[in-house]
Amino acid sequence: MAAPKRLTQHDIAKLAGVSQATVSLVLNGAPTALARIPQETRERVQQVIRSTGYVADPIARRMAKGLNRILGVFTYEPAFPSAQADFFTPFLLGIEEEAQIQNYDLLLLTGAGVGQDRKIFADGNRLRIADGCLVLGREFDRTELKRLVLGDYPFVAIGRREDAGGPVPYVGGDYANGTRTLVEKARALGHSKLAYIGPSGPAESIVDRWDGFAAALGDGLELVLHIETVGSAAGDILDALLGYGATVAFFVELADAVRVEAAARERGLSIPEDFSAVVLGSHIRAERSHMQFTAFDIPREEMGRQATAMLVRRIESGDAGGQILLTCEPVEGETLGPAKRRT
Amino acid sequence: MAAPKRLTQHDIAKLAGVSQATVSLVLNGAPTALARIPQETRERVQQVIRSTGYVADPIARRMAKGLNRILGVFTYEPAFPSAQADFFTPFLLGIEEEAQIQNYDLLLLTGAGVGQDRKIFADGNRLRIADGCLVLGREFDRTELKRLVLGDYPFVAIGRREDAGGPVPYVGGDYANGTRTLVEKARALGHSKLAYIGPSGPAESIVDRWDGFAAALGDGLELVLHIETVGSAAGDILDALLGYGATVAFFVELADAVRVEAAARERGLSIPEDFSAVVLGSHIRAERSHMQFTAFDIPREEMGRQATAMLVRRIESGDAGGQILLTCEPVEGETLGPAKRRT
DNA sequence: ATTAGCTGCTAATACGCATTAGCAGTCAAG
DNA sequence: CTTGACTGCTAATGCGTATTAGCAGCTAAT
């Protein structure tokens, strides 16, 4: 059995004894054009439409209007494996929300390459299927970014990005100031010997944290320990912290903080009584860990929303796109206390 | 300045010094037609395409041919809000995987209706942008499902669905047998007084659990308590459990189980020594809760994969689509033990 | 009596692609 | 030297809608 052919405006027109153009005008003509179609004709057409249940084909509509209303979402790491899901989900929430408001659909370019080595320009360049695209990931390929910037395909990055052959349109979190604020808090609580546990590059997000941290040093604040390597044994970190007399430790990675806290507790030390701990960023599902670390909030959903809005502006108005850093508010937590007076 | 115009086959044709038709043929002409375009010309066109990053407009493609290798994913609840994310993410992972294998892109249908009231047919069914679509959500709108079934648009539901004007093509989990198996396990461990904490409808997934449970009753097994309301106070549930002498409680919701377990511990009771607990379904991130509940596994990724494969068959071969229930294997866990001998 | 302006439409075209019919040229067989 | 087959393309058309230009018929003003 062949599918019953879809009704077209042509069919409606014939039934109503008018032309296809008239049907289209009745459906969605400008007021000025509508004024020239008498009530009687309009009703006749409407009647036919109602009785046949005709609905305009959205594809043809978009075709005629020249709009696809599709936004691409490209992620450098694969988006859905559960480990990554935690990272991408909040962004996607914001993106989805705003896309819905703006009446766009989302094309997930999650499968563009297999495994780790995802390239925007790799395969048949699927992303141009969409009107524009959002790019997210912890680390970007600089060469690709440059091509994007120099090209005329509208895109917006989520997370701050260094210039790459020109300014990169992005919406990011202001990690530098978020970090600085936390350092100031520590200062106000009497801390003077700080430790920094985590790398200082090369990703922008990491650089910003370090920059904010370094900028707040001096004036009574001293960095007594900096462990750049990731995944050091918790015991070693703890030994170093105590050895160098740090009263507060700033962690780039929540996981490190969690492990160090556990190690400390095992040795009968407690946070923040014996030393304070601060995490530079908010972790998803904070509620699940049994200790609420002092940190700063990363407004991921808002980043997604604003990036989407910016992209739509670029697509619809040819806007150049800007660079937005959203404030990362401090999260009180329970791991930053007054500096312990050391003997 | 207006948005940068999209490249068209016409542009490519001019650059390569051929006609638009030739470009189209090079891209996806039938072998017989391709045979008549010499290697040299083909390569010249391909080169231009590669250097410009041209990709066919999916809308125009669908307009001309009726297919564009895009699968729509329609979710009743928004897909990414964190509460839902846990629910949808594993399905999406499977869908993504299979879509990639089959060389389809995924279009997330968002803008269809605002807020809770998501309707597939809301705005002149934009879902026709894709060649077919997967429908997921805890509860479906029956009227819409009927329209889908009666219509000629290919779709597949994830999760079992009752007939709606005809059989609904779906890939679901066999919750009934998953539940029954767990009840049998309890029986084997000497339990005879069971409690069921959770509703028995109206969603199919809920009905199936209850049906599987009810079917296993009798023959020495007695339902001594059934709490249908959701979100009761943990203390109340616990009181009821003990009051009615239940030795094992079957929970539809993991959250209830977690809360009851906590309440029990507070009163000095422990699971499974004092009573057993079984959760009817697998929770994502089981590793994060400090207790591993006995439950059955829901093969979400596999459901996503198979539903996608079925959808592609429907699209490409006009297949009617079937009804598949995947086995839900029991998860051992540590909360189901021998029945306590009661005084 | 010409013009201007209005009314009630319709014809024509564009949107970007896929696809079919067929044209102009070459080459070989008859 | 004609016919036929084959090669390497292109022109033309259709998909269903939105939109613009404009036609025919009428009225009213000059």
Image: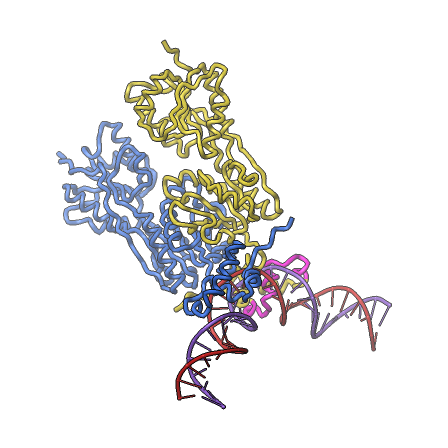
Chain colours: A blue, B yellow, C purple, D red
x, y percent for residue A267: 24, 28
Quadrant of image for the C terminus of chain A: top left
Residue at point 57%, 40% (across, down): B166
Q: Nearer the viewer, residue A330 or A3?
A: A3
x, y percent for residue B319: 61, 44
Which residues make up the magenta segment?
A: B13-35
Our reading of the magenta stretch's main secondary structure is helix
Number of callouts: 0
Which residue lies most toward the top here? Answer: B343
Which quarter of the figure has residue B282?
top left
Compared across the picture, whether A106 is left or right of B258 comes to right
x, y percent for residue A195: 23, 41
Residue at point 25%, 42% (across, down): A295
Which quarter of the figure has residue B262?
top left
Q: Nearer the viewer, residue D27 or A31?
A: D27
Question: In the rendered image, is residue B46 in sight?
Answer: no
Residue A28 belongs to the span the image colors magenta: no
x, y percent for residue A101: 37, 53
Where A320 sits versus B337, above or below?
A: below
Residue B20 belongs to the span the image colors magenta: yes
Compared across the picture, whether B140 is left or right of A170 comes to right
Q: Nearer the viewer, residue A224 or B181?
A: B181
Residue at point 44%, 26% (across, down): B295
Question: In the rendered image, is residue A135 in sight?
Answer: yes
